[in-house]
Structures are given as structure tokens and as C-alpha cells.
DNA sequence: GGCATAAGGCACTGATTTGGTGCTATTTCA
DNA sequence: TGAAATAGCACCAAATCAGTGCCTTATGCC
């Protein structure tokens, strides 16, 4: 009953539960596009803590990824096309923008906090690692919800779970 | 004085301090290839907590990334060629192997723990997300220490820090 | 031999993050 | 009016992480 995405031990690839729940909810909404899905429905379907999911959906709403409708028969629905919502968007909405390095970006404006990092000739890995991170980030930005709903080619994992019910709307 | 790699707010791209320190130490050792570098020397050079760095180096030693020499004039040295040590190796040694999903990989053997996850048709994002993670992981496996030492083309970050002293040996 | 200086091995603390819940207010439909 | 939904926010417990203490063992040098 629990969906069990799996937990990474390596922090570098770890998704938080919030992001996992958010992705699950969003993918679920892709099917129900056009209708409003309640947090209860999703939480019961995937055996996810309802209150926490509600909190996540709220953040997704703040991030303009979903639109909400209050009251009975209310719920959430995708606020834009599924192709236009990426994993990166979700991560950004739920874990905060990946300010690539505290030393050279405050939010996304580009104004360094106080230039305290320019005086760092010692750090040998800063810039190259930035590129790695940016690359990963680009990858997440390039992965949309539709890519999550329809597993295209089972290249890595030979055995795939039953995703037919979520294949496409 | 502190190297300040930078701290990510987004967990997905976050490196732990341990990994950061490990990478810094390893990159430092690339220069000193053939000689034994002490934890003290590295910690003083980059203003990194010595004891913690020692702990990290110990793990790198366990992971066979470096070799250690005890006693006075002892220290650590790369146990194989810098090209053959990747960021992925470091992450794996310091944060544990990125068992891509707790449900379908015990270590790296490929033997599922108990097949407890096969009964999960509900989770819509499991398999696709695996591919994303594997892709990211491949990227880290493809980034070697030499790639970290010599920043090739400043495509993303226009302004690069002074890395000349670590350019090549 | 003795001392200084290395790594090796734990175990432990303190701070932060994360997962999850409680409670209350507000909106909507029947 | 009442049930069901989101909105907001504060709060708690467990896990993780950064960092330290203390001791042992090994090596080089005097």
C-alpha cells in the first residue's frame, strides 16, 4: 500500500519526502486533468500522510504549479500543461530554489552577499562542482511530468511496475 | 580562509561537508601525486576541521580511494590514477552507495531485499525517477578528479576563481 | 629507548533538518 | 446549517550532520 519510492542513502541524489509526495500528487493529477483532486483522495490512493501531503500541495499552489479550489468538491488541479511542469520546478517549489552556492548567489538575483567568497583561491573544487550541479539541475529542468507518467524505454530497469493505469489520460 | 564551497538549500543537489572535504583533499592530492600528504597539512591549507577531515580520509581509505601511511612523515596518497577516481566514487565512499531505491537493490548486487516493492502499482513515479537518478549518477561517475582540477571551459560561470595553483602538477 | 607525529577507532555531543501532527480559520456546495 | 475542502501556522519527535574527545597503534628521528 505504501508507494515506496525508495530511500537513497546517498544525500546527493536524495529526494525529500515532500518532493516525492509532490511528484506523486502531480503525476496523479495529470490523469485527472481538468478536474479538481482533493488531498484526501491522493493520500488514500497512495497511502501518504494526508496532512503532510496537504502541506506539500499548499506549497505547490504557492509555486503556481497547481491551482486550488476550496470548499466541498474542491481540490487541486494542474495550473498549466503537464509538459510545462518539470521535476526541477517541483524541487524548487518544495525545497527552495537551488541557490547554486551560498557564496555567489543570494536568491536568483545574482547579487553576491558580500563577496566573501571571491577571496577563496584555496578552494579547488568550487567552480567545477558548480558545473556538475548545474548540469544535474538542467537535467531536472528537462524532465517534465509527462516524462514521469510514461516510462519510454526500459533501458536501465528491465522490470517495470504496472504503470498502465497512469499511462496517459 | 575557509574555502566556502557553498551550501545548497535544495537537498537534491546538496553535497555533505564530508564529501566536500573529501573532494578538496583528493584534488589537493592530485598535485602531490606520489607523496604522502597529512591530514594536518590539508586541514591547515583549506581551513577545514582537522579531526573531521581525518575521519573523511579514513573513509576514503576504506573505500580504497587513497592509501595511508602511518607514523611520522605519514599521510595519504591517491591509491590509483586521478582519472580513475570519480565524484561518484567519492560520494559512494563517504555517503554510502546510492542504492537507487531501497526496494530493489540491497547493495549493488541487484538482489531485491524481499520483493516487497513489486506489489506497488500505485507509485507512479518510481521507475521513471530511477532513470533520472541513474542519469545523475552516471554524470557523477563520469566526472573524475582531473575534471575537478582543471576547469576546462567557463561556459556557465563567467567569472572563475583562481585555480591556477591547482591547475596541474 | 624515547619522543613527536602520523593514522585508526570509537563514542559522543549539539545543531539543524525532516517527517509528521494539531488546531483553528475560511471557503464552498448541498 | 453542516460537511468537506483548502489555508495558515505552530509544534513535536526522530533522524541526520558537523564536529570533537580520548585513546591506541605505527613510524621516523634524535
Image: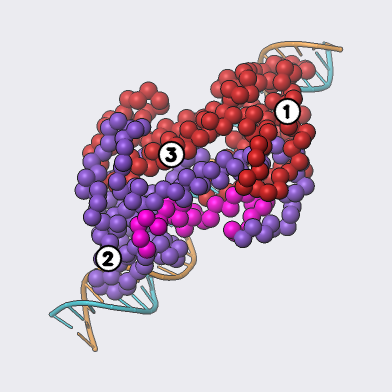
Chain colours: A red, B purple, C orange, D cyan
- Label 2, label 3: how far apart the Cα atoms are: 30 Å
Q: Residue at x 37, y 65 (%)?
A: B79
- Residue nearer the viewer, C28 or B16: B16
Q: Dividing the image into 4 quarters, which one contains the N terminus of chain A?
A: top right
- Residue nearer the viewer, D19 or A73: A73
For residue B25, side relative to residue B105 (left or right): left
Q: Is residue C29 above or below residue D6?
A: above
| Element assignment for label 2 | loop
Q: Can residue B7 be seen by looking at this rendering? A: no
The answer to the question of whether label 1 and label 3 lie on touching residues, with beta carbons closer than 8 A, is: no
- Label 2, label 1: how far apart the Cα atoms are: 57 Å
Q: Residue at x 52, y 30 (%)?
A: A141
| Element assignment for label 3 | helix
Marks 2/3 same chain:
no
Q: Which residue position is annotated with label 2?
A: B34
Question: Residue A104: x percent and y percent?
Answer: 33, 32
Q: Residue at x 71, y 45 (%)?
A: A160
- Residue nearer the viewer, B75 or B118: B118
Q: Which residue position is annotated with label 3?
A: A133
Q: Where does the magenta region start and end?
A: B80-108
Question: Residue A75: x percent and y percent?
Answer: 72, 21
Chain containing the residue with disc 2: B
Q: Which residue position is annotated with label 1?
A: A168
Question: Residue B51: x percent and y percent?
Answer: 35, 59
Q: Residues within 10 Å of mark 1 (few under 14, many from 20)?
A: few
Chain containing the residue with disc 3: A
A116 drawn magenta: no
Amino acid at each position: 500500500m505504501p508507494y515506496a519510492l525508495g530511500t537513497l542513502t546517498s544525500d546527493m541524489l536524495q529526494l525529500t519526502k515532500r518532493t516525492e509526495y509532490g511528484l506523486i500528487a502531480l503525476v496523479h493529477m495529470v490523469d485527472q486533468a481538468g478536474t479538481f483532486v482533493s488531498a484526501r483522495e491522493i493520500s488514500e490512493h497512495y497511502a501518504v500522510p494526508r496532512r503532510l501531503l496537504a502541506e506539500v500541495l499548499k506549497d505547490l499552489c504557492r509555486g503556481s504549479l497547481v491551482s486550488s479550489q476550496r470548499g466541498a468538491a474542491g481540490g487541486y488541479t494542474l495550473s498549466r500543461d503537464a509538459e510545462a511542469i518539470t521535476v526541477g520546478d517541483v524541487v524548487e517549489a518544495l525545497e527552495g530554489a537551488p541557490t547554486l552556492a551560498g557564496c555567489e548567489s543570494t536568491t536568483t538575483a545574482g547579487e553576491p552577499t558580500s563577496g566573501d567568497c571571491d577571496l577563496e583561491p584555496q578552494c579547488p573544487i568550487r567552480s567545477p562542482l558548480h558545473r556538475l550541479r548545474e548540469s544535474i539541475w538542467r537535467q531536472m529542468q528537462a524532465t517534465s511530468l509527462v516524462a514521469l507518467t510514461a516510462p519510454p524505454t526500459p533501458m536501465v530497469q528491465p522490470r517495470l511496475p504496472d504503470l498502465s493505469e497512469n499511462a496517459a489520460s
